[in-house]
Amino acid sequence: MGWAVTAAAAVLMMAWGAPLEAASLKVAPAHLIIHDVAPGQPYDLFKETGLKFAVYNDDDSARTWALATHRPSERGRWELGYTEIPDASWCRFDTATVEVTPHGIANANLLIEVPPDEAYCNQQWVVTASVGSPEGAGVSIGVDIRIQVETAPNPHPVTPPAGDLGIYPSVVRIEAPAPGVPLTGTLMVRNNTDQPLEPQVSRLFDHPKIDPKNYLTHGRVRLPDPARLTWSPPSAIGPGETATISLGLTLPQDATGPGKHWEELLLIETPGHDARFARVQIGAAPAQEEAKTSE
């Protein structure tokens, strides 16, 4: 029985965390994951999700705050398995500043536009959004928000995915797994460097100090028995070559049914290069199941 790899029906988004604070400034959401952003298609956070960033002013006087985006290496660390967005200007606010009344709230929308290049499918990027004092302010305060941007998966790219390691598809979906039946699938790993690479594969959530909530797709939880997901160790990959990682999974007899929305992340690492990951999703997407229930 094969694994079905399909494009997402809709852009999914997850936001969480208490508002970030700096003196009288608060910003929400504090953390954001955006999935399935298609290269060449403008993405509008408010139109897609109904969400805008909220900037709170707890001061007794009006305040003006500057909004900008940056590559995360300019502003600190980020989650393992993600890479820096190639150009922070691909992700921007709809306004450069907001004016917030005393004890008031102002909103700003986030816009993303990835160039129309197939190499930018199957990507997991981080961009840092900043809200803070305008340039030249006497006293500077501000907060940074990590935004995780994942582009649309493409299981059969003609152009190799960008990055030292090109992983595809970035999301493997098992829409209707049968309990007790062995399932098989593949991940492809391309070496885009000029040196041989020996990738190592592991379960991302097994790594120390990893918080699954910073990664899991909204509505999904980790496999209750992650060891059931197995893979074949990849061999060394020469420059410009592609290796296949064979995946296997057998679910117990009571594993399927409504509410079974699982996800496991496989981390692919090579010394001296950015780590990458692929999502393995088991069971129908939560939104699809809800739609079927309401029919």
Image: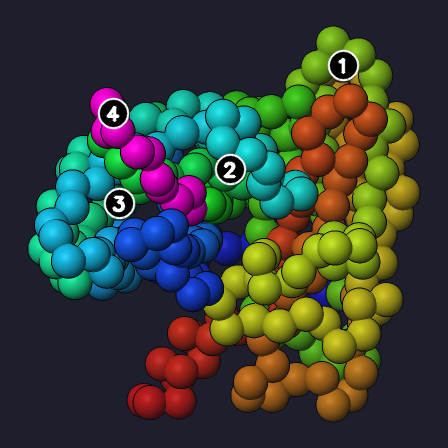
Return the residue at label 2. Answer: 125
Mark 2 vs 3, N-terminal side:
3
Quadrant housing the C terminus: bottom left
Q: Disc 2 to disc 1, how far (Cα)?
A: 23 Å
Q: Is residue 187 above or below residue 199?
A: below
Mark 3 vs 1, N-terminal side:
3
Q: Disc 2 to disc 3, how far (Cα)?
A: 16 Å
Return the residue at label 1. Answer: 239
* Callout 4 crowding tier (Cα within 10 Å): few <14, some 14–19, many ≥20: few
> What colour scheme does the image use?
rainbow
Mark 4 vs 1, N-terminal side:
4
Q: Disc 4 to disc 3, how far (Cα)?
A: 21 Å
Mark 4 vs 3, N-terminal side:
3
| Amino acid at the residue labelled 3 | Leu
Q: Secondary structure at mark 4?
A: loop
Q: Disc 3 to disc 1, how far (Cα)?
A: 38 Å
Q: Which residues are magenta?
A: 136-145
Give the prevailing secondary structure in the magenta stretch.
Answer: loop
Image-based side of 137 in relation to 157, left or right: left
| Amino acid at the residue labelled 2 | Trp
Residue pictured at 45% horizontal, 80% vertical: 289
Q: Disc 4 to disc 1, how far (Cα)?
A: 45 Å
Q: Position of residue 283 (x, y in %)?
A: 59, 73
3 and 1 marks in contact (CB < 8 Å) = no
Q: Position of residue 42 (x, y in %)?
A: 25, 39
Return the residue at label 3. Answer: 110
| Amino acid at the residue labelled 1 | Pro
